[in-house]
Amino acid sequence: MATFLDLKNISKRFGGVQALTDVDLSLEAGEVHCLVGENGSGKSTLIKIISGVQPPEAGGTITIEGRSYTQLNPVESTRAGIQVIYQDLSLFPNLTVAENIAVGQHLGGFRSVDWTTIRKIAEAAMARINVYFDLDAKVEDLSIANRQLVAICRAMAADAKLVIMDEPTASLTRHEVDALLSLVRELKKKNICIVFVSHRLDEVLEVAERVTVLRDGKKVGTYDAKDVNDKKLAVLMTGKEFSYDLKETDLKSRKTVLSVKNLSRKGDFKNISFDLREGEILGITGLLGSGRTELALSLFGMNPPDEGEITLNDKPLALKSNREAIDNGIAYVSEDRLTLGLVLEQPIAANATVTILDKLKGAMGLIPLNAREATVDRWVKDLSIKVSNTANPVKTLSGGNQQRVVLAKWMATTPRVLILDSPTVGVDILAKDGIYEIVRGLAQKGVAVIMISDEIPEVLYHSHRILVMRNGRLTGEFEPHRSSEDQLRIAVNA
């Protein structure tokens, strides 16, 4: 295959931080390439240099189809056929499908909008990848998977030769992932190069031909996908070997903390029954839409069930709000930490203590500064949150440290039951391991944990017991030491 893009000696410094050091990268036309590395490894900086958003340091070269540049700007990058589909997709939710697909054709200059041409451009782009939408539908009304397809259509309308996808499978069901990977294979047949940037290595490796690993801003190497797996890549990315043993743990003698009997909510789930014991990590897995999150919200008082019973420490509960759940010792870490878990513009300290303001209040209803600082310092230390100043906005932290702040705010409430909904989504491999260690530590202290995830290895290697949900029902129970990833996948997808 012919080389489409060739990077040589690409370096980038931001103040005192060396983000990239002499990185080489070669991408071939019609290739599916995976770019991996921990958060902070330099992936995003490299993408910004390829797309012309950031210039590299002097001494590096960028060659596109034989033409060399010392740096690119966004217009040059786009004209060369380079398109980046970011995790947030960068679509206009209030505009139509047609407008979003053809938007790039109407940038710059003073031109009237030719609606007939816009529709033709959108129809042609959709035809290239064999997808069809109502051109007049608002993008905000589409599913995440379909929005992603609209973003890909926009890249096709711009005559893309290289499409870089940032975390393309993070918010998709397994069925939607399969459809996306099938589409990638079709793009490959059209000689389009696809680059995946992803933490979900097992899925990406299904279609990738080569994998480039970055660590601390340096290239570790480029490998044939057939010669690596997610475990080997984890070692290459971090320099650390991860070993998770499936050990039998008998918790039957432990006290039952939470009991759920025949819990149902019309349209969400039906006849859900299980017990959760003190110090137990109960994994619940299933495809997106299986009713997992709806069940979690019911246990947290935000999605009242129609039928059934919830008992906490032998006391019947009829939760009508999340405040009642919190007062009874139930905490919930949402899968969407950026929207529901954190106030990004607010300080780290404020986010970590927002759940216990009443407990911190002193005389005249004021919160003593020393009391808040002591609480924050305790959780920063106990959860190993990497932070230079707790007065900084929480948005300045990495994804893994943001998730630790979310855990801190709930652990400050001293919960009896902690519900974790997709606790490591968007978090790199080393940060994931740190979160698993925290969860194990909480369980050892007697906290009962429900860990919801659609990542099979996550529940298999980090739970004492696993429940499978499908179409709103519990359809199976597994003991990790007697189960395998393949068995769980079959149960989830049956």
Image: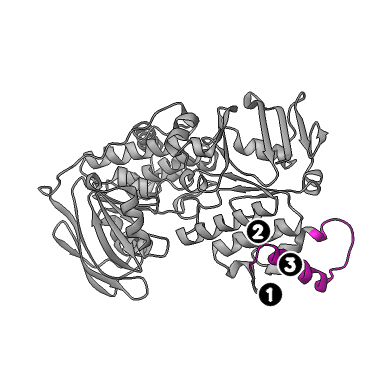
Q: Quadrant of residue 375?
A: top left
What amino acid does circle 1 point to?
A: Asp
Q: Look at the numbered disc 2 and give the secondary structure of its residue.
A: helix
Q: Residue 151 carries which label?
A: 2
Name the quarter where the N terminus is drawn: top right
Residue farthest to the right, as pictured: 110
Q: Look at the numbered disc 1 and give the secondary structure of its residue.
A: loop
Residues packed near mark 1 inside 10 Å, few (<14), some (14 to 19) or many (20 plus): few
Q: In which quarter of the image is residue 461?
A: top left
Residue sitting at x 73%, y 67%: 122
**Does residue 170 show up?**
yes
* Mark 3, residue position: 122
Viewer-side residue, 367 vs 191: 191
First in sequence, mark 2 or 1: give its number.
1
Q: Residue 66 carries which label?
A: none
What amino acid does circle 3 point to?
A: Ala
Where is residue 320? Give x, y as percent: 30, 68
First in sequence, mark 3 or 2: give its number.
3
What amino acid does circle 2 point to?
A: Ala
Name the quarter where the C terminus is drawn: bottom left
Q: Which of marks 3 and 1 is in front?
A: 3
> What distance separates the C-alpha of mark 2 from that of mark 1?
16 Å
Where is residue 101? Give x, y as percent: 71, 63
Q: In this picture, is 327 found above or below 364? A: below
Where is residue 179? Give x, y as percent: 54, 60
The stretch of residues the image draws in magenta is 105-131
